[in-house]
Image: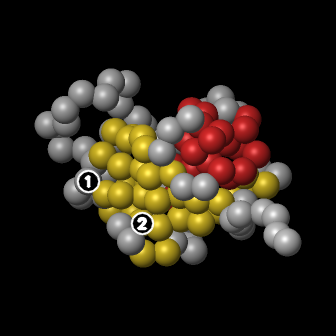
Amino acid sequence: MNGNTPIKVAETRKARDDGFPRINIRFFGPIIGIIGKSRDTIDLQTMTTTIREIILHLSERYGEKFEAIALNKGDLNPGLIVFLNGSHVTDWNRKLSLNDEIELMIASQMKGGL
C-alpha cells in the first residue's frame, strides 16, 4: 500500500444528495473471510474513476490481506473477478462514467482441488 488513495472518497457515509455517485460493492468467496463482510459502499467525490482506482482504494481500506488477493506485484491480480452492474470487467483502466448508483461485484479465483 502506498498511502495515497487515487480517488476522492467522501469522508462520511450519510445519505447522498450531493450528486456524486455511490458504489455498492458485494464481495464473494475468500474475500469475505478476509475483510469480515460481504458488502460495502464507496461514496465518491468525482464523476469518473476506473476499476483499477477502486481496487487500489479498497486495498488501502482493508489492508495487506485484501491487497494480497487483489494485487500482484503492485498491479491488479489477473485472478480477481469483477462485475460492474452485472457485466464482466476485463479492462481495468476503462474510465467509468458514474451518473447513478452502481453495483460492483468482486471475487477471487478459488484455489484448491481434488
**Residue labelled with disc 2:** 84
Q: Residue at x 31, y 57 (%)?
A: 102
Whether residue 108 sits left or right of residue 41 in the image: it is right
**Residue labelled with disc 1:** 101
- Furthest toward the right, the residue is 114
- Furthest toward the top, the residue is 12
Counting residues from the start of the chain, the first of labels 1 and 2 encountered is: 2
The residue tagged with tag 2: helix, strand or loop? strand
Q: Residue at x 67, y 33 (%)?
A: 63
| Residue 90 screen position, x and y as percent | 57, 74
Whether residue 66 sits left or right of residue 112 in the image: it is left
Q: Residue at x 79, y 55 (%)?
A: 72
- Residue 44 vs 84, above or below: the answer is above
| Residue 99 screen position, x and y as percent | 24, 58
Which quarter of the rendering shows the C terminus? bottom right
The residue tagged with tag 1: helix, strand or loop? loop
| Residue 42 screen position, x and y as percent | 39, 41
Camera-nearest residue between 70 and 11: 70
| Residue 70 screen position, x and y as percent | 68, 52
Q: Amino acid at mark 2?
A: Leu
Which quarter of the rendering shows the N terminus? top right
Whether residue 89 sits left or right of residue 66 in the image: it is left
Q: Is residue 60 visible?
A: no
Camera-nearest residue between 31 and 95: 31
Near mark 2 (Cα within 10 A), the count class, few <14, some 14-19 or many ≥20, is some
Q: CA distance from mark 1 to mark 2?
A: 11 Å
- Furthest toward the left, the residue is 17
Q: Is residue 10 visible?
A: yes
- Residue 109 vs 45, above or below: the answer is below
Q: Amino acid at mark 1?
A: Glu
* Quarter of the image where one finds residue 78: bottom right
